[in-house]
Image: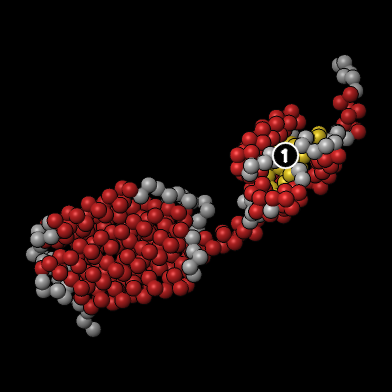
Amino acid sequence: MELDVRSLMVVFTVNVLAVSLALPAIMGWGMGPAARHAVLSTLLQGGGWLFLVFSTFWRNQWQDQACSVLAMAGMSASLVLLWRSIGLWTGRPQRAWPMWTLTVLMTLGYGIGFEHYPWRVGLANGVLGLQMLAITVAVSRHSPTTGWRWRALIGLCMTATATVTFWRGILGAFFTEAYPYLTAPHPVNMAAALVSNLSLMLTTVAILMAYREEAERELQAQAMTDGLTGLLNRRAWTERAEALLADAQRYGYPLVAVMLDIDHFKRINDERGHARGDQALQLLSRLLREELRTGDLAGRYGGEEFCVLLTHTREGQALSLDQRLRQCLRLQSAQELDFPLEYSAGLAAMGTQDTTLDGLLRRADEALYEAKRAGRGQVVLAPRHAVETREAAAPAVPA
């Protein structure tokens, strides 16, 4: 069976257009920004190849030039969007302006120098090859949050396609007699068409793998996160807090548990509306994230109640944090909610008798209710266990 380059180009164009329409149908319209970039990349790639196929049928120079310029712009832009989607998926987004600058300059240079065949072929294939290599570099970077299989698949496809693209550009620029027109039956041109078709299939599989991975991470995050405040929910907070408590007991570093409860929250909902109540919860949650350190843990325990675990922290440091948080809350609530927001808190420092998280939280909760009984808007420090108090008060025995 004989194959010609034009037929392979038409087959590739039909395939890429089919993929560009199938991807959003498979992924759904609620996809994240990375997946949207990947879908748009495929659409632009399909449009670029469609214009390129059209350019082979036109006999009018201006029609040929217009279709060819649009084709190069679409192909280059599709690579930029794919590069961008990989950066979002791997959590390593880069500044996109250098890639877009290459696209703009290549499109302008291609259109201006269209009549000079070696120039436009060398320029277009050179820039497209560089952008493909940029994608290979992007997927080769270490990313602990993403799998290596789909990244390796895209890297392999981009490397192979870049190789034949560079080769075709060299032929057109420096050995024009061997590659005098787009559909010339040169072995490299034939190889480029075959590699493009194979790469399309494998890259589509890789995109679907990346999207599935993203969806699984999103579901996992939703299962662990409180939807309103963005903090950990009670179950996720408890699981992580138990691990932090075990580390503190094993290595002997101080730890403080804090229970917080927004004062008169029911009155806020009744008098100001549930929307204002939600804003109050979101404000306190945001300030907690801003004030806490990396190793600390905050979560919404239920309703208007929050739990915080302060690692490597003693009672005095926890009280200082409480003071800073209260000052920020008073200031921000007056500006954002138009009324002052206060909370009551109970602090419990981990002692030798706190063998479980439940016991430590029970002491913090008792201190919280003591703060409420005392008039709210304050913090109460839970008393130490009786055994620890007697040990701390005992006089030192001389050696």
**Direction top: furthest residue:** 398
Q: Position of residue 86 (x, y in %)?
A: 42, 56
Q: Position of residue 4 (x, y in %)?
A: 20, 77
Q: Quadrant of the N terminus?
A: bottom left
Asked if one can make out residue 152 in the rendered structure from this viewpoint, the answer is no
Q: Position of residue 324 (x, y in %)?
A: 66, 32
Q: Quadrant of residue 295?
A: top right
Q: Quadrant of residue 288?
A: top right
Q: Amino acid at mark 1?
A: Glu
Q: Which residue: 22% across, 54% down? A: 106
Q: Which residue: 70% across, 40% down? A: 341
Q: Is residue 268 above or below residue 353?
A: below
Given residues 154 and 235, the one toward you in this image is: 235
Q: Is residue 99 above or below residue 396?
A: below
Q: Which residue is tagged 1?
A: 342
Given residues 188 and 258, the one toward you in this image is: 258
Given residues 153 and 99, the one toward you in this image is: 99
Tell me if 57 is positioned left or right of 273 in this view.
left
Asked if one can make out residue 78 in the rendered structure from this viewpoint, the answer is yes
Tell me if 48 is positioned left or right of 40 in this view.
left
Q: Quadrant of residue 12?
A: bottom left
**Direction bottom: furthest residue:** 1
Q: Which residue: 52% across, 53% down? A: 145
**Direction front: furthest residue:** 271
Q: Residues within 10 Å of mark 1 (few under 14, many from 20)?
A: many
Q: Quadrant of the C terminus?
A: top right
Q: Is residue 275 above or below residue 45?
A: above
Q: Position of residue 19 (x, y in %)?
A: 38, 72
Element assignment for label 1: loop
Tell me if 147 is positioned left or right of 112 in this view.
right
